[in-house]
Image: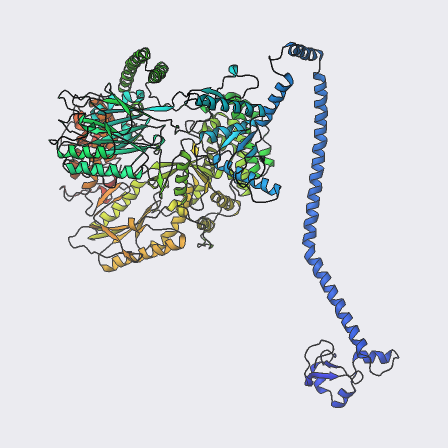
Amino acid sequence: MNCFKCQLNLLSEDALPCSSCKRSLHFGCAGQSESNFRKMSKAVRSSWRCVDCRGATRDGSPSGPKDPTSQNDAFLQSIFLKMNEQIAQTIRQELHPFKEEITQKLTAMQTSIDSCSDQYMSLSGELASLREELLSLKSDNLQARVKTLEDKFSAAPPPSGVDEEALFSEIEDRRRRSQNVLFFNVPESSSPNPSIAASEDLSQVNNYMASVFPVDPVLAQRGLRLGKRSEAHIRPLKIVFPNSSAATRVLSTLRSNKSAVFPVSDDKTLRQRDFLNRLRTELTQRKENGEPHLTISSRNSPKKRGPLEPSSGTLTAPADAHHTLSIYYQNVRGLNTKLTVLHHEAPHLTFDVIIFTETWLSNQVATGELRLSNYSVFRTDRSPKNNMHKSGPGGGVLVGVLNKYLSYQWSPIEDTVEHAAVLVPQFRLIVSAIYLPSYQPADVLESYLSQLESISLQYPTFAITIVGDFNLPGVCSETWNGDVCPSSSSAKTRLLFTSVKQFDLKQYNSLPNPSGNVLDLCFSNLDLQLNVADPLLRLDLAHPPFVCTINVPEFRPYHVTQQFEFNFARGDYASMESYLSTVDWSGCTTLPLNLAVDYFYEVIRSAISLFVPRIRPVNHSYPKWFTAELIQMVQQKRRAHSRYKATGNDGDYKLFSDLRKSCGALSRSLYNAYLNDVQSSLLTNVKAFWNYVNYKDGVSSPPTTMTYMGRQSDSLLETANLFAQYFSSVYEQPVLCEPSYPVVDVVSIGLVSVSLGRVQQALASLDPTKGMGPDGVPPILLRNCPSLAIPLHALFNKSLVSGTFPQVWKASFLTPIHKQGSRSAVDHYRPISTLSTIPKTFEKLVLQDTAPLLYPVIAPQQHGFVPGRSTLSNLVAFQEYVLGAFEGGCRQVDCISTDFSKAFDKISHKHIIAVLRAVGLHGAFLSWLGDYLHGRTMQVRLRGVTSASFPASSGVPQGSHIGPLLFLLLINTVVPEISDVQFLLYADDLKIFTKVDDAQDAALLQNSLDKLLAWCGVNSFFLNRSKCFVISFLKTQNPISFPYILDGEALQRKDQARDLGVLFDSRLLFPDHVGMVAGRAMRALGFLKRCTPWYGPRTTRFTSRNSSECNGSSSGTWHTGQEGWMIIILNPCEPGLASPPWKHAGSLPIPCFFGSWSSGSWTAQRFLPKSPSTPHPTPLASPHSSTYRSLPQTTSTTVPSIASLVK
């Protein structure tokens, strides 16, 4: 039973029935309280009437029962009314915000309409004034000049046989078609809707354009398929670009790129197509009539072209149907003593391939020292692997291939022979160079021939050319081309003869030495001509040099055609500054940030195009001593040589020979003068000397072919994309959790601003010699245009106030730098980042205000990227602790050195922001730093080619000013976890250490290591377990060998280890470190001997700082026990020293650091004889510390100062 009023369940003990209408209600619904209801008697309850019945009686209506149906209808109607009112109220509440939003938008639209109306009225007024101005320009003088031109034009006779109207029509048609480019093999859309299909075609092309032009993409406007749809072939796609220059850029770039995905062509007119069809018909007929080498080539001279002829299309014989490849060979009998001559001759080399045997090089001689900058150099030096019988100096081969050809070295399975096999895919050619000493047994030659067979099986379509010193005397040169090998021949001769026949090779060298032997052989399965050559280096009579020429199919140059670029060094910056000072920069303050930045760059690019000249970069790397006269003579010599090779005429050869003689004489004279200038400037300009020496490797760019994960690149673009794939693999995906750190609130930074004066000062201090970043604005422009400080000041502060970092400033270029191992492997390179100058300047300004407030947050144990601390301070603090422990009676200090894998690239952005929030950063500045990290993009730039862009989803920007500080703040959170033991940090290099008197001390260090591992998991750091190790520093013969565990595996234990450039041993005696420094000094001085023909006392004095002093000591003191090591380090200098730089043998010089030393300076004033009792303390260690205390005077127990060992 339900209550009549509330329709809820009604119990009999709570029911109050109406005596009139017989309806039952809850006593509450009947208006009775529970106490009154319980007191009611049965008689009262039986006579009780409801409100409706009592009301009906008072109104005079019968007091009998009411109609239940009418009562129900009235009740339901009341319920519906209440529900309607509630629904209406709910709707009004929910729609109120939308109503306000619509009202605001309508108001904004009305404001925009009013603004547009105002602008329209303004433009109407300007248009009216322009119309009046144009009318005023129609003066009588102008009309007279126009009439004169019209008279001259009407008087000029039309070209003979050409319809004037058709000529104008053709010119206009070509002008319209100049914006069009025809794309072939673009997949067609399957959509039957023409508009959708056209949209998909346009999207395909624009995506392709974005990959070809990643920095400044050329976007298509519209596209159109030509012809009817067919299942048999793909229709060409005509793309319309914004202007003719954009179309020309697309055509020139894609035509020069042999790996282009879609072939392209210009949109020719009907007359052009007819003309080319006639040429093709004529070509077919003339080939059938016996002229097979004809082809259709471009002719760009307008004087020889008819008015209706296309800009290309003449029948000519190709200049080189087959390219003549020249290979120079010489047994050089050691290159180390001939480097000066090679440096002089290298720029004049025109051979396509050069081969040297018996180079006598080792891994101590860098390829860059050879100065063969126009060649890709491949070496195989003698080593115990490829020559087990004699591992000393000698042997070795070198193959150099011109850079314009794609080439790479084949890697043998077993490196057991002194040989180098180089593949040149453009010619389908394998060039192999070998040196086979006479004492080598036949099985070494057999190993080489086996490797040769592997190459031929791997590349069956490639021809083979083998050149080398086989050292097989007594064999007639014609024997190799005969049918039978003489029975008296040696085992090596018979083995080589058999393989020659197997590979179908022919031997071409028949130039005997004075003994009548032919030791250097040239095998090939191609037809070639071999002639004696003028020796490039000093002649070895036993090995006459030769040149062989091979006719190979026409090649395609490997190098990318260089586009025009701006020559900022010759910019007219005075005029540019005047132009920029008149620009209205109000857009930088009124527009949204990213639009304001785009407006700024539009103005800058416009100024660059007006005041900076364009040049086409020339890829000639002439040496410094080349003058304009010599360069012109070299070019004339090369043209004469090409003419002689094409004609074979004696007169052409005489001209070439005379030019070669004159060129060589002038070059030698200039080279000697250059060397004399460098030598004479040692006392006044040491920098010139070091520029000449070029101490570094000298080979900066990767080889022409690279490999990564089984893929091999065949073009620069593919190589750049392989590097991009590898470099992008180190980044981590954003973490899903929201990290948090304990709030310390040591600072409170919510908003930062920069002043105009500081921006002006920052621009004035830029280095004009630095390069530019992705935005294309170099420092030289910013420095010479100080008026740019005004818009940059506005943009910087707008960025800081809005809490956003412009997207264009988040881009960066990556340049691959070789680390170690094979230069052809992509994963043997590391990236160097290049940021744009403007955002780097912005970061520097922001850091000037914020860094001093944040540095106190960083633990004092952190020595990286902190002012006043360095690797030296880190190492001195470590040595202080170890020596102090020993002096305090402790016999052992255990140190665990850790290595974080790609820490700067892998740290989480969310963790960085959480740390910044915890230290007290908030508001717009915290948002600005978050946006600074988010959305950064990178591209690999390689010799003018850029890869596809990829995001940097983790890490801090490399090469930035703010990035290192953000990293330090995040890694600083490790401090509470390892505070139970001692620790030191240098950026991400962390070592934890403690005194070990018993197993409990070692367990404490193990506990800190476990905490460190747990901290890494929480904070997105990754330990590289293979590079983590433990070393014990001992003063006992019975050490405690505790098995330290990391991630379930025991750490490797070392007796010596490198830490921040210093080799530590367990006894802190540093003999290996001193030996390493002495070896480095010896290698450096050996390099100087090879590179400086005037090597002597003066050279040694001015180079000893780099070879010994800097490697052995930078500051601090030398103790008595170190005198022997001081002599070891300085010993390499003695051959060039007239006398020791000190007078008394008992008082060794102490290097004392006074301010900033000039490079290469070593004078007596720098070395002040001091006794060991009066040391020179460094500012990073106390003179009363253990590092500088007197130690036992025996070499075996003397501990040197770290400060005196750090480079």
Left or right, residue 305 beside residue 470: right
Q: Is residue 68 above or below residue 1204?
A: below
Q: Is residue 606 above or below residue 640?
A: below
Residue 1021 percent across, percent down from the top left: 38, 51
Residue 419 visible? The answer is yes
Left or right, residue 391 beside residue 9: left
* Residue lying at 68% horizontally and 46% vertically, measured from the top left: 105
Left or right, residue 864 beside residue 12: left
Q: Is residue 1160 above or below residue 197?
A: above
* Residue lying at 28% horizontally and 45% vertically, measured from the top left: 877
* Residue lying at 27% horizontally and 40% vertically, measured from the top left: 1061
Left or right, residue 729 beside residue 243: left
Q: Is residue 952 above or below residue 1161?
A: below
Q: Residue furthest front?
A: 289
Of residues 60 and 1152, the one drawn nearer to the viewer in this rendering = 60
Residue 1009 percent across, percent down from the top left: 31, 55
Of residues 1196 and 1063, the one drawn nearer to the viewer in this rendering = 1063
Residue 297 visible? The answer is no
Q: Residue furthest left?
A: 488
Of residues 1082 and 327, the one drawn nearer to the viewer in this rendering = 327
Residue 123 percent across, percent down from the top left: 70, 29
Colour treatment of the image: rainbow
Q: Quadrant of the N terminus?
A: bottom right
Q: Quadrant of the C terminus?
A: top left
The part of the image, by quadrant, that contains residue 1182 is top left
Residue 51 percent across, percent down from the top left: 79, 79
Q: How many numbered badges does the structure rendering display?
A: 0
The part of the image, by quadrant, that contains residue 485 is top left
Of residues 122 and 1177, the one drawn nearer to the viewer in this rendering = 122
